[in-house]
Amino acid sequence: MSEVPEAVSREDERPSRASEAFFGRRRGKALRSGQSAALASGLGRYGLDLSSPAPDDLRRLLSSPVEGVRLEIGFGGGEHLLHEATTRPGTGFIGVEPFVNGMAKMAAALERQPLANIRLFHDDATLLLDWLPAASLDGIDLLYPDPWPKKRHWKRRFVNAANLDRFARALKPGGRFRFASDIDTYVNWTLLHCRAHPAFEWQAHEAADWHTPYEGWPGTRYEAKALREGRPPAYLTFLRS
C-alpha cells in the first residue's frame, strides 16, 4: 500500500464549505433538451426537499412499504443504485449525486422504469446527513468516490473524522458503511480513519475479504475501467457499533 497520513487531524482535513467541497465540478457536457426535461421531472418526483424537517421514520419518505432505508453517496451513473433498488424492492434507497450529468442519467432511467423505493438528493451529501434523524439508516455506501490523489487535496476526501461522526449519528447500531475504491492511498486512508473512530469496526476476517466484491455486486463502468488499467479494487465494510 502507498503513503498514508501518520495521524488524523480534524482541523487539517475539514474543507471550508464556502470555498471547497468534497466533490469537483458540478457539470460536464451540456444536457440535451430531453435530458434537461427528464432531470426536472425526476427531481420533481423523486427529489428530497430539506427545507422541511425529516420524518422520524425515513420509511415515510417512500411511496412503497420498505423494511429499512440505505444511502448511497455519489452514485455516478447510477448502475449500482438502480441495481440495488430494482433487486431489493423491500428496501428504501436515497441516492446523492451533485454532478448534473449523473443525476440526469438517473432521472432518465427512472423515467423509463419508475421505482417506488428510491429518493434522490442533488447537492452536498453532508447537508443530507445533517438533515437525517439519528439512527435512521440501515447502511451507507460510498463507492469509488473522488480520490483527490494529490496530497494537498486529501482534506477534500469525503472520508474524514467529521463525516464519520455524521455516519455514526445517522446509522442504526449494526448498520454498515461500505467503501469501494481502486486507489490504494484512499483505501489506506479510509482504513486509518475508521480504525481511529470508536463507532466503526472493520469487517474482514481474512486477506481475500477486502478484494471480494459485495454479494450481488453488479459492477460499475468506472470499476471496469480500473480493472482494464490494472488497478484492483478494494471493498471495505465497517460495522456501526
Image (cartoon, helix red, strand yellow):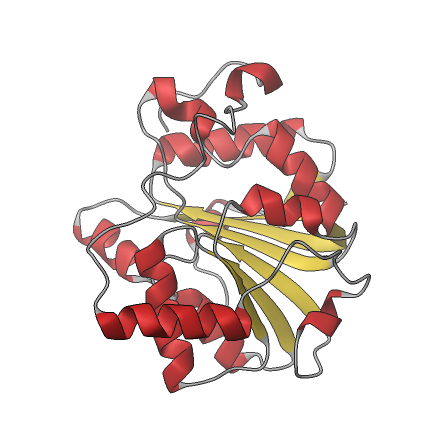
Q: Is residue 119 above or below residue 53?
A: below
Q: Nearer the viewer, residue 45 or 150?
A: 45
Residue that appears at 49% across and 27% down: 18
Q: Residue furthest right?
A: 56
> Residue 29, located in which quarter of the rendered image?
bottom left
Q: Is residue 13 above or below residue 174?
A: above
Could you tell whether 91 is left or right of 15 in the image? Answer: right
Position in image of residue 6 (x %, y %) = 51, 14
In the rendered image, the quadrant that contains the C terminus is top right
Residue that appears at 62% across and 28% down: 161
Q: Nearer the viewer, residue 44 or 62?
A: 44
Residue that appears at 37% across and 23% down: 153
Could you tell whether 136 is left or right of 202 in the image? Answer: right
Q: Is residue 108 above or below residue 240?
A: below
Position in image of residue 210 (x %, y %) = 47, 48
Q: Nearer the viewer, residue 153 or 114?
A: 114
- Residue 30 seen in this snapshot: yes
> Residue 77, located in which quarter of the rendered image?
bottom left
